[in-house]
Each structure stands twice: as structure tokens, then as C-alpha cells.
């Protein structure tokens, strides 16, 4: 039986002029110029001010607003005010780097171990700990900074203000980066690789060491880079628990000198240095991440970027 | 060739919370045998395999490897190796390093490692692939590396968890033959889990059909196919053409059984001939004969051809008996034109020795069909979960 | 398969607990305990001589002196904190709304129409993350100074070019907030929008909805979790912000709650009140924070 459902209309039996019919309305496949323009406008608005600030760090004059020619005096030239020569300025650079390195080295292993432990240890206590960890991610930094300041000055006074307190505070503030990123990666890896390792003769610890950690390396590395960059830029917590001027990192120094104090372009120079350090960390992170996950299928650069951003 | 490889499962049980996945399984597998666990998603076959491998501790029962109870041993201490459904090749190691992975724990001297890796890869026809990375290989190649990785350790038993599940049909058929040949060559016990009955029938020395955590039937492929013990097994392996029937009063006997299909009486000579009351009847499609409608003869039921489906080398003929049952048969396309087409009335011949009487499990034919499908319908990726 | 992972792990429970231990200690000592200290300071007294804080550790002895002082300050006559609180809410609401309004089209465009340049766009959008907050604010301070670009540009177009942008204008503070927090919003929105299944939108078009209707009924509805997440990620930290105001304005007319807390903490004798205020802000934020934490924890458990 022939059914007419689903059968296309019969083709014309002889050549007839084809009817052109334009549907009313605009081309449905047109490019979204409006949105694209808006996006570019946003990008320009987002980046240009920073570019200008970087530019002014090379300003010959002392103004942050009028361009007076190119010079590197704020970095290395001027004997008094350049970053290289002014003690408080270059101590700030060193302090930032020390703080970032210390925090990363302490925070990442603790965070990775925490992630693995929480993932495997199924109980109320572990869910509770996980809860607390997410909480630390979401709380406004000021509240935690205040609480830590009080802790260190009133209770655990053996943690001195300055670098020790700053490090401790930054470690706990950034703990959620490795914990969350590594945990997400753990969940997507699944159990089969460790089971395969155990099947082939590896003990539990051996399987973790020889299989799990190598597979987690990209995530561990990405979280380390994030912790580093986050610490370089951190301001609220560090300011709260810092002590004398000599142990101030760059972020705090800039903040305290914005409304007066050190002359403008040296602040720009300092900020540019911070920028370069962060960008370098980002670059190393991106390249390193790609290299480490070369054994696995990556869907392209976009994925690695969002991976690093922790989403 | 290694000695040993005798596996005995003694009343093995596994429950997760209040769900019983494996319900008193007792099996004895001979050394060097290719043994398959066959069943739909959710029947417990993978759980059983994982218990033998050591990834799940049994709730009760024993697992004996060459006489030793290994039920409480961790996986790395058992002389068994597993080929995983997802292959689980370590992506950060090369093929050669993957295969060599387990040898570290057997204290194989460094000089010997490379030789053995080479031998293992040659066994699976991947010589020369040592330096490649797993993500550069096709699915079939990855599966072979997984095989090589397990075999290089010379286990007494190899466990395979639906290894061909992720491959396309043609590749699967090729590898089925290769796996069977490989097992004969290496000579160790293979414990193979699958939901594909064609695989199990092709490769196994013996197979066990599982349903809801229990073994429905255990035996060599021909036996399980030709003499299914119940309606479920009959329908799981191939087409069974299950029908509802009533035993004629006084019709049951030792050598034949008189059955009523709707208004028609037929005689069956296989299966549970002393059954009474309502039963299920099965007949394999290749045993059905089609005759012209006017032809007479014993064990004939009038019917009609509902649909013809061209399968290439054969044609599938869908029939509807006058009693209401739907049957299928296969006809070889040997060049002659078929004497019937859609709508032709025919006389369907059901030879008595091909009609098998099976106990009635109390559910309809359609429900039995659903059971044999398991949860496969819902699993979009095509991988079974237990 | 995922359901039954637990049975094998129970054997090695000690190992998992051991791994969790350092992190657990860090969290308990440096995250949970400090809030108890804050409570003790809030409920404590002052050493009159040194004007320093004397914390009271026993909850039974906590005094409500600090609490009533702050309460008075918020709701009483001449309230300074009360104004700051209201202002904070207004600034945050406006800044969050503006951020979402800008971020959504951008994120939508990049995720849907990014095409081959998607990576480029993402790099440009992620870039502000790696630029410290200080630098981003500094950049605007440079531009908004009396002799800066903004004023020069305005006078170039014939508009008044001598506004003191940095002297205490709400607009500047809101601009600072938007500029500072918008990258987070964009990224969160992008992550969610990117995951929207394109075939859902295509199905809607196929079934006859116009471009606009599809957007309104399908895409926007599917974006709801994204918008909620984006709001949380922005508004919660923003409510505790104080440095943006400090940098962009520094005048009392634009103070936010964060500034009030800072001020009280640093004033001798009023540290306890600072602690109280911080706790009050915490309590107010607790419910949205809990909501966010619970839904995050729940969704991560769904994957495991």
C-alpha cells in the first residue's frame, strides 16, 4: 500500500520556471554585528586603561596624566625614586615574590591531599569539612581578614604579624583553589585507572603515586599557578595582618600611597611589575598545562583556559 | 603456557545496601577454559567479575583460585589480570611503558622487560608500537594494548569485562575470532563478560546465562542454544519465537506432548514433556518451514506472511499464525524467487522435534522480552552497568 | 558504576583521613577558630588604660556592650553605620545589575558566535584576572585625575572638563566596582552559557519560534542558573568591599560597610565594635552564602 505520509511532493514533470520567494524579515543567518561590536567595546574599555597605566610607568615626567616622553627612570634610572633603588619599593617586590612562593609551596600540597582525602572518605565529617572549605571560598575577604587579625593578636600570638601571619592567612584563603580544581579533576578521572594499576600489582599507595598523581598533574599545576597569581594580587588579607613598612608587599604599598605619598609613576611601575609577574605565571601555567596533558585529548585552547580559570 | 587457572565460585553473593546484585552463584571453571558470563544490563555479571578480580569484597561465599580462597585478598595479590571495558590505558605513558607497568611488581630484571613487552605486542599484532601514546591509537588498537598489558604478566586467569563493547560491529566480529584464537594459543583461562549473545556463542567453551543475579543455565553454546532450560534463556539467545500454549488434557507424556495453540493441536517432542496446564513453547526460526496454504500435513498451523525484511544473505519472514502468535523465520536467498509475499496466506510447519516445551514463568511473552533486554534501552552509550 | 565505589575504599579509611588532616587543621585553626575569637572580642571589654581589646573567652560572660553601641549607631540618631549599610546595598545592587547587563551579551556572543576566534576572545576576557585589582583601580585613578584623560576628552567635546571625579562621587565608586568585578561575572556566565546544549535552541527554532522568542523562552530560561551564580559571585564579595571606595573616593559621603568596619577596628577602644559589625554583616550574608554552598556541594556530589 502506498502511503502519502512523509512523501515529498512530486517533482514537476517538465521544466517550469523556479519560483523565487523571499520570506519577509531579515536574513536569519546574519552575523550579530551589534553584539560583536558591543563585545569589542567592552574589551577595549577593559584593557585600554591598563595599557595606559603601563605606558605611564615609562613616563619621563612625574605625572600620571600628561605624557612627557619615554624613560625607564621609575624602574632603574632615578637614584631616589626608582624601584631598583628605593628600598621600600624594591623590598615590596621581593616581599611579594617571597610571599607568593611560600604560600604556593605550602598551600598546594595541603590542598591536593585534602581533595584526594575528601573524595575517598565518605562520611559526615568529610562532608562537613568540604562544606567549610567551600564556605571559605565564598566569604567576603574582609571578614576573614578581620577574624584572622584578631586571632593572631589575641589568641595565637606566636604567629607574628608580618610574613608569618600573612603566609598562614594566605594559605587558608587560597586552600579552596587546589581543593576544588583537583577534586573536579578527580571526579572526571574516575576509578578505572587506579583499579587497573591495582590489578597489575600496585598497592594502594603505589597506585596513587604512579598513576593518580601523574594524571592529576595538570590540575595540580593549574591550581599552583592560580594560587601564585592570587597571592601576588592579594591585598585585603595581607594588609590586615601585615606589620611594619618593610614587609609590605607591592599591593599594600600601592594602596597606601595612592592618595599622596610616593610619586605617581613609581606606583605605575610597581603595578606594572605586579602585572608582569602575574602574566608570566599565567603564561607558564598555560604552557605547562598543555604540555602536561599532552597524553590526553584536549578539545583546544579554550578548554585549557577555562580549566586554569578554575571553572 | 602457565599451569593452573581453575576457578571455583562457591555460593557467591553480593549485596549493595538492600539491592542483591549477585545471588548465590556457584560455578566451576576448568583451567584453560574460555568461559562467558552472559546476560543483559543489571544481571550481575560485571559485579561477579569484579569480585573475582578483587575490586569488590563478596558479601558471602567463596572465590577459589586453584584451591585457594582469595575472597579477601586485595587485587594486586591475586594471580588474575583484567581487561577493562574502557581499557584504562595510562595516558601519560607510552604503549611500551603501559605494557611494562605491571612487571615492576614482579621484579622482572630490566633486560627482560623489553623482550617481554615485544613478545606481548607481537601476540596482539601490534609490534613496533612501543613508542606511541594511547591517544594516538584507534579503539581496536587500544583494546589490544590493554590485552597485551594483562597477558605480559602471565596470569593464570584473564578477566575480560565487555572488552569489545565500544567497537563497531565489523571490528567486533573480527576481534571475536582473534580473541578466541588468542586464548587457544596462550592456553590460560578466560573469564569473559558480555551482553552480546553472538559473542558468547562464538567464543566460549562454556557459558552461563545470568538473570537477576542468578545463573539461569550453564553449558556449552550448542546445548544452551538448542536446549534452553526456560523461556528466559530461550529468548535471550537468538530468536525463540515464544508462544503461549496449553497442554491437552492427558496429552503430556515421556516422548511427546500434545499442545493446543489457539484452535490448533500440535505435538512437541523436546523440552519439559511432562508439563501440564499452560506452558511456553519455543522454536528456532531456522526450523520453521513454510508451505502453500492448501498443503496438508501434521504439525501445521495456518498463518499469513506479515512482512519480509531483506537482510542480505537471508530474508527474514514475519508470520502471524491463525492462533494469534507472531513468529519469525529465516530463508536463504539462494537465487530462487520467494513463492510468497506480504499478505500471502501460508501453512506454517512446526516440526515436532523442534518444538520445545518450556515451563511457564507466569509472565507474558512481551514481559519476557523486556527482561532479556534488561536496562539496555535506557543506556544511550551502549555500555552495560553491571 | 559510580554508586558503589565506597565499598573498596573503606579498607583504606585511615589513609584518606590522614590526607585530609593538614587541610582540616588549617581550616579549623585558621578559618573556624578566628570567628570564635571575633565573637569573644565582640562580647568582650576594653582595657581602659591602653584602649586595647580584652577578649572574653567564656560565652557565658560575654557582654552586650559593644553590640548595643553598634546597634545604636546603626538605628539611632545620627547613624553613620546605618547610612553606610544602606549605601552599600544600593551600590552593590546597581553595580551588580550593570555588570550583569554588560556581561551577558558579551558572554553570550563569545560562547555562541565565537567561532574560530573563541580562544582569542577568551584570552582577552580572562586577561583582567591576571591583572591585580590594584592596577586596575590605579589605571582609572590615572584617567580620572584632574588633569587626566577623561577630563581632557570631555573638554575636547565641549563638555565641562574639570570635575573632581575622585573627590567623593558615587558614580566613580560604582564605576570602580563594576570595572573590578565584571571579569568574574563574564567568566561565570560564559562557563554556564557554553554548556547550554545548542540542539535545544535549534529544536526551538525548528518548532517555529522566532529568534527573539527562542531567546526569551528558551535561552534565558536556561541561563537562569548562570545568572544566579554570577550574581552570587559578584554581590557577596562586593558587600564586603572597602578598598574600592577608599581608592576611588576616600570621602565620607561614599563609605560602605567595609569602610565602617575598618574604621571601627582601627579606632582605639572601638575594636570590639568593629568585631560586632563584622559579625553582623556575616550573619546577614550567611543565608545567601549557605544557599550557594549547599547548591554547590549538592551539584558536585551529583557528579561523584
Image (cartoon, coloured by chain):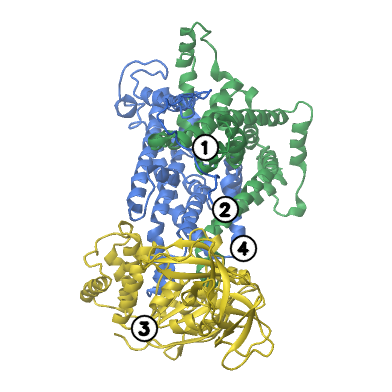
Report the side of B117 relative to C35 (left or right). left
Badge 3 sits on which subunit? B
Q: Chain of mark 2?
A: A
Q: CA distance from mark 3 to mark 4?
A: 42 Å
Q: Is residue C239 left or right of residue A44?
A: right
Up the image or down, A195 lies above or below C90; here it is below
Where is mark 4, residue-wise?
A125
Question: Which chain is disc 4 placed on?
Answer: A
According to the picture, the residue beneath numbered tag 2 turns out to be A133
The CA distance from mark 1 to mark 3 is 57 Å
Which one is closest to the eye, mark 1 or mark 2? 1
Judged from the image, the secondary structure of the residue bearing numbered disc 4 is: helix
Residue B156 marker: 3
Q: Is residue B70 left or right of residue C220?
A: left
Chain in yellow, by letter, is B
Q: Residues within 10 Å of mark 3 (few under 14, many from 20)?
A: many
Question: Which residue lies under the disc numbered 1?
Answer: C184
Within the image, what quadrant is residue A192 found in?
bottom left
Q: Nearer the viewer, mark 1 or mark 4?
A: 1
Amino acid at each position: 500500500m502506498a502511503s502519502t505520509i512523509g512523501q515529498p511532493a512530486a517533482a514537476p514533470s517538465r521544466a517550469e520556471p523556479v519560483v523565487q520567494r523571499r520570506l519577509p524579515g531579515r536574513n536569519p543567518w546574519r552575523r550579530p554585528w551589534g553584539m560583536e561590536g558591543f563585545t569589542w567595546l567592552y574589551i577595549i574599555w577593559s584593557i585600554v586603561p591598563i595599557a595606559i597605566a603601563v605606558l605611564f610607568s615609562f613616563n619621563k615626567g612625574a605625572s600620571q596624566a600628561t605624557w612627557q616622553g619615554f624613560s625607564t627612570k621609575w624602574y632603574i634610572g632615578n637614584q631616589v625614586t626608582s624601584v631598583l633603588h628605593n628600598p621600600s619599593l624594591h623590598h615590596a617586590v621581593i616581599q611579594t615574590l617571597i610571599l607568593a612562593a611560600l604560600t604556593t609551596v605550602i598551600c598546594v600540597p595541603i590542598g591536593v591531599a585534602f581533595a584526594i582525602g575528601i573524595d575517598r572518605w565518605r562520611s559526615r565529617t568529610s562532608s562537613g569539612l568540604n562544606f567549610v572549605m567551600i564556605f571559605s571560598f565564598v566569604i567576603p575577604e574582609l571578614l576573614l581578614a578581620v577574624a584572622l587579625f584578631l586571632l593572631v593578636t589575641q589568641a595565637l600570638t606566636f604567629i607574628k604579624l608580618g610574613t608569618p601571619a600573612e603566609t598562614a592567612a594566605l594559605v587558608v584563603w587560597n586552600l579552596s583553589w587546589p581543593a576544588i580544581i583537583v577534586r573536579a579533576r578527580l571526579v572526571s578521572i574516575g576509578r578505572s585507572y587506579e583499579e587497573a594499576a591495582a590489578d597489575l600489582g600496585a598497592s594502594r599507595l603505589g597506585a596513587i603515586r604512579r598513576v593518580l598523581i601523574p594524571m592529576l598533574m595538570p590540575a595540580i599545576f593549574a591550581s599552583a599557578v592560580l594560587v601564585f597569581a592570587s597571592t601576588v594580587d592579594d591585598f585585603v588579607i595581607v594588609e590586615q595582618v601585615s606589620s611594619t613598612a618593610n614587609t609590605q608587599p607591592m599591593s599594600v604599598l600601592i594602596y597606601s600611597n595612592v592618595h599622596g605619598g610616593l610619586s605617581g609613576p613609581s606606583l605605575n611601575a610597581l603595578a606594572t611589575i605586579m602585572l608582569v609577574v602575574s602574566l608570566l605565571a599565567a603564561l607558564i601555567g598555560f604552557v605547562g598545562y598543555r604540555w602536561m596533558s599532552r597524553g590526553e585529548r584536549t578539545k583546544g585552547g579554550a578548554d585549557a583556559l577555562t580549566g586554569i580559570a578554575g571553572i | 603456557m602457565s599451569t593452573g587457572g581453575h576457578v571455583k565460585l562457591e555460593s557467591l553473593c553480593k549485596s549493595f545496601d538492600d539491592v542483591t546484585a549477585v545471588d548465590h552463584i556457584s560455578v566451576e571453571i576448568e583451567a584453560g577454559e574460555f568461559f562467558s558470563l552472559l546476560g543483559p544490563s543489571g544481571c550481575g555479571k560485571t559485579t561477579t567479575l569484579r569480585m573475582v578480580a578483587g575490586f569488590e569484597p563478596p558479601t558471602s561465599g567463596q572465590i577459589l583460585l586453584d584451591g585457594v580462597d582469595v575472597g579477601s585478598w586485595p587485587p594486586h595479590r591475586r594471580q588474575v589480570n583484567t581487561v577493562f571495558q574502557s581499557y584504562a590505558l595510562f595516558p601519560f605513558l607510552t604503549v611500551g611503558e603501559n605494557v611494562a607497568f605491571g612487571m615492576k611488581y614482579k621484579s622482572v630484571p630490566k633486560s627482560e622487560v623489553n623482550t617481554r613487552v615485544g613478545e606481548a605486542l607481537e601476540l596482539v599484532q601490534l609490534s613496533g608500537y612501543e613508542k606511541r601514546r594511547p591517544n594516538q591509537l584507534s579503539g581496536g588498537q587500544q583494546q589490544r594494548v590493554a590485552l597485551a598489558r594483562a597477558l605480559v604478566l602471565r596470569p593464570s586467569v584473564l578477566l575480560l569485562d565487555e572488552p569489545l563493547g565500544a567497537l563497531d560491529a565489523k571490528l567486533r566480529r573480527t576481534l571475536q575470532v582473534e580473541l578466541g584464537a588468542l586464548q587457544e594459543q596462550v592456553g590460560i583461562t578466560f573469564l569473559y563478560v558480555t551482553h552480546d549473545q553472538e559473542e558468547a556463542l562464538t567464543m566460549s567453551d562454556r557459558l552461563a546465562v545470568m538473570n537477576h543475579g542468578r545463573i539461569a543455565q550453564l553449558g556449552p553454546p550448542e546445548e544452551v542454544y538448542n536446549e534452553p532450560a526456560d523461556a528466559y534463556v530461550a529468548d535471550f539467545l537468538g530468536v525463540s519465537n515464544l508462544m503461549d500454549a496449553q497442554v491437552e488434557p492427558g496429552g503430556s507424556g515421556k516422548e511427546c506432548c500434545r499442545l493446543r495453540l489457539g484452535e490448533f493441536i500440535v505435538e512437541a517432542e523436546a523440552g519439559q514433556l511432562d508439563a501440564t496446564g499452560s506452558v511456553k513453547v519455543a522454536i528456532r526460526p531456522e526450523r520453521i518451514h513454510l508451505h502453500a496454504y492448501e498443503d496438508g500435513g501434521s504439525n501445521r498451523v495456518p498463518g499469513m506472511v506479515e512482512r519480509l525484511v531483506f537482510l542480505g544473505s537471508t530474508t527474514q519472514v514475519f508470520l502471524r499464525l491463525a492462533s494469534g502468535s507472531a513468529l519469525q523465520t529465516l530463508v536463504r536467498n539462494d537465487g530462487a524467487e520467494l513463492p510468497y509475499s506480504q499478505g500471502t496466506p501460508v501453512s506454517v510447519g512446526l516440526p515436532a522435534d523442534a518444538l520445545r516445551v518450556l515451563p511457564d514463568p507466569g509472565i507474558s511473552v512481551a514481559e519476557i522480552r523486556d527482561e532479556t533486554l534488561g536496562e539496555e534501552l535506557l543506556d544511550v552509550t551502549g555500555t552495560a552497568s553491571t | 558504576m559510580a554508586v558503589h565505589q565506597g565499598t573498596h575504599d573503606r579498607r583504606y579509611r585511615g589513609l584518606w583521613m590522614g590526607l585530609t588532616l593538614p587541610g582540616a587543621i588549617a581550616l579549623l585553626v585558621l578559618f573556624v577558630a578566628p570567628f570564635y575569637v571575633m565573637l569573644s572580642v565582640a562580647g568582650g571589654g576594653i582595657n581602659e588604660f591602653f584602649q586595647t581589646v580584652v577578649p572574653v573567652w567564656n560565652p557565658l560572660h560575654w557582654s552586650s556592650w559593644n553590640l548595643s553601641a553598634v546597634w545604636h549607631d546603626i538605628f539611632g540618631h545620627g547613624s553613620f553605620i546605618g547610612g553606610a549599610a544602606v549605601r552599600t546595598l544600593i551600590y552593590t545592587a546597581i553595580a551588580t545589575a550593570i555588570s550583569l547587563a554588560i556581561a551577558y551579551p558579551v558572554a553570550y556572543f563569545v560562547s555562541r558566535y565565537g567561532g574560530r576566534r573563541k580562544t582569542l576572545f577568551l584570552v582577552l576576557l580572562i586577561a583582567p584576572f591576571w591583572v591585580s585589582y590594584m592596577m586596575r583601580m590605579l589605571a582609572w585613578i590615572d584617567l580620572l585625575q584632574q588633569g587626566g584623560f577623561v577630563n581632557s576628552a570631555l573638554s575636547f567635546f565641549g563638555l565641562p572638563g574639570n570635575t573632581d571625579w575622585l573627590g567623593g562621587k558615587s558614580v566613580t565608586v560604582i564605576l570602580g566596582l563594576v570595572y573590578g568585578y565584571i571579569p568574574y561575572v563574564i567568566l561565570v556566565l560564559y562557563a554556564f552559557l557554553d554548556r547550554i546544549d545548542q540542539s535545544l535552541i535549534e529544536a526551538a527554532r525548528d518548532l517555529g519560534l522566532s529568534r527573539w522568542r527562542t531567546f526569551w523562552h528558551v535561552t534565558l530560561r536556561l541561563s537562569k542558573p548562570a545568572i544566579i551564580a554570577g550574581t552570587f559571585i559578584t554581590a557577596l564579595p562586593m558587600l564586603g568591599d572597602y578598598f574600592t571606595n577608599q581608592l576611588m573616593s576616600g570621602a565620607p559621603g561614599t563609605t560602605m560597610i567595609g569602610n565602617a568596619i575598618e574604621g571601627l577596628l582601627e579606632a582605639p577602644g572601638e575594636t570590639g565594635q568593629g568585631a560586632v559589625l563584622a559579625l553582623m554583616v556575616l550573619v546577614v550574608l550567611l543565608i545567601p552564602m549557605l544557599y550557594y554552598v549547599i547548591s554547590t556541594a549538592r551539584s558536585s556530589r551529583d557528579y561523584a
